[in-house]
Amino acid sequence: MECLYGRMSYASWRLRQFRQLVNNSSTTIRGPIPLQHNNHHRIRTLSTSTDETEFHPEPPQPAQQPSDTAPKETPAKPTRKPRAKKFPPPSSLLPKSPLLTDPKPGYERLHKKKARSKPSNPEDDLSTNPWAVALASPIRQCSLTGQRMPTEFMTGWGLEQHPEGKSLFIHPSEILPPVSVPVPDPSPSSSPSSSSPDHQKTTQTSQEIRHLRFRMVNRLTLLNTITESMRKSKRKFPAIVLTFPVRWRPPLGPMTESMMASCVWRQDMPQFVTRMMRREVGQRLRRAATQPNDSPKRQVWTPVLPLEDGGKLEEEALVEALAKMEPIARMETGAVLVLRRTAGSSPLPLSSFFHLPQTNSKVPVFDMTRLLAEEDLACAKFQGQAAVFFRPDDKPTVNAMLGLWKLAGLLRDDPHLDPHLSS
């Protein structure tokens, strides 16, 4: 099939060939379609579908003069012709290219969120295992020691600009919410476009540094060492800025030399981090212990030693009481929470892990009298108990367990909080 009419466009010729092949068109075109510029007498003889009706304007007829002898008759209403049945255009019956019908093959299959099927055996659900959740977190490098470990075992730090000054405070952004800078309301006389250049510069600077984060391991002794070195240093730039990644520093990073010189490290940073982390862990523990669906059937909080026997709460008595416990499901994912200790002289520190004869494994031991304050333990679940066995089974309880582990890692081997280590 060749195009015999040079004036006809390729689209018109192709449509004509399609109509000849399908044989569904009622008009036959013998030559090129003449284009008439008179809009009043234009006739549509070519259409892409068979349901389009042709429009033929009729010439106006002269008006008849009314005669006196002719009887008056009411004009009959013109009857409407029934609509022709709509058929799909012939072009829709032809096969189409897959590039048009499916321009992104496999996109929905690859990006469709599949519903996770719950394991048939609850013991195989790793989302309720806090140690599996921690080990599955992304591996990152400590900016100070260079050690690589999961992010759940480290604390994220960031920079926050002082609302009234140009200083950049270094603070633990994970356990401390960012300080919100109050934006003054515009006056009625000022236009929206007119704003002070100092406010624009402050907003721009805060946006540049808001996303900057670095991570460090949770050790109070490390924070004490940094604070002592910062107190003795008299450099132009604080020593802590040397731990910032290279992509932050000039000329590659968003920070300038003036920003690096304005970084401030709190002189009470060890005490501040300890106070903030205790508050965060206390909130997690209270949220986990006051759930509405908390029933004894869940076996999340299992009493180990009642308060009547707390006067003789030593490590031997605690290990013996733990060995007499009835075995529960997923017992190896839990921990022992010591809520009360012997009054009087300072008791000896407990071991970090206890052996479970029920599962032949080790579980961590958290001395809550050393980690948290009394108001954090004022919960109905902990009343009348000297020690409980804590086994997480959902997201709030898993977060509480990971928070306790992070707080215990922060206060580990600290002679200021544990006087037996310095002796």
Image: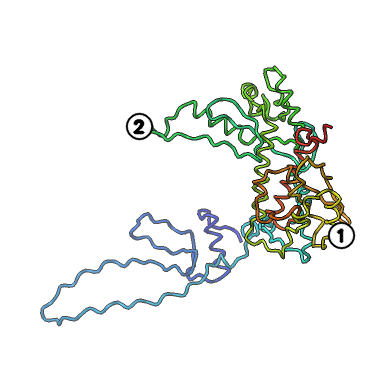
Q: Residue at point 72% right, 36% down?
A: 215
Residue 125 sits in which quadrant? bottom right
Element under label 2? Answer: loop
Relative to residue 350, is residue 260 drawn left or right?
Answer: left
Say which residue label 1 marks.
Answer: 358
How many numbered circles are shown? 2
Residue 177 sits in which quadrant? top right
Q: Nearer the viewer, residue 374 or 126?
A: 374
Q: Nearer the viewer, residue 311 or 110?
A: 311
Q: Is disc 1 surrounded by few (<14), some (14 to 19) or many (20+) residues within 10 Å?
A: some
Q: Earlier in the sequence, mark 1 or mark 2?
A: 2
Residue 127 visible somewhere in the drawing: no
Relative to residue 255, is residue 357 drawn left or right?
Answer: right
Residue 63 visible somewhere in the drawing: yes
Q: Is disc 2 surrounded by few (<14), some (14 to 19) or many (20+) residues within 10 Å?
A: few
Q: Is residue 354 above or below residue 22?
A: above
Q: Which numbered disc, 1 or 2, marks the residue closer to the eye?
A: 1
Q: Where's residue 16, x and y in %?
A: 53, 63
Q: Nearer the viewer, residue 330 or 315?
A: 315
Residue 369 sits in which quadrant? top right
Specify the quadrant that holds the C terminus.
top right
CA–CA distance in space, label 1 to label 2: 76 Å
Say which residue label 2 marks.
Answer: 189
Query: Callout 2, which amino acid?
Result: Ser
Q: Where's residue 100, x and y in %?
A: 61, 57
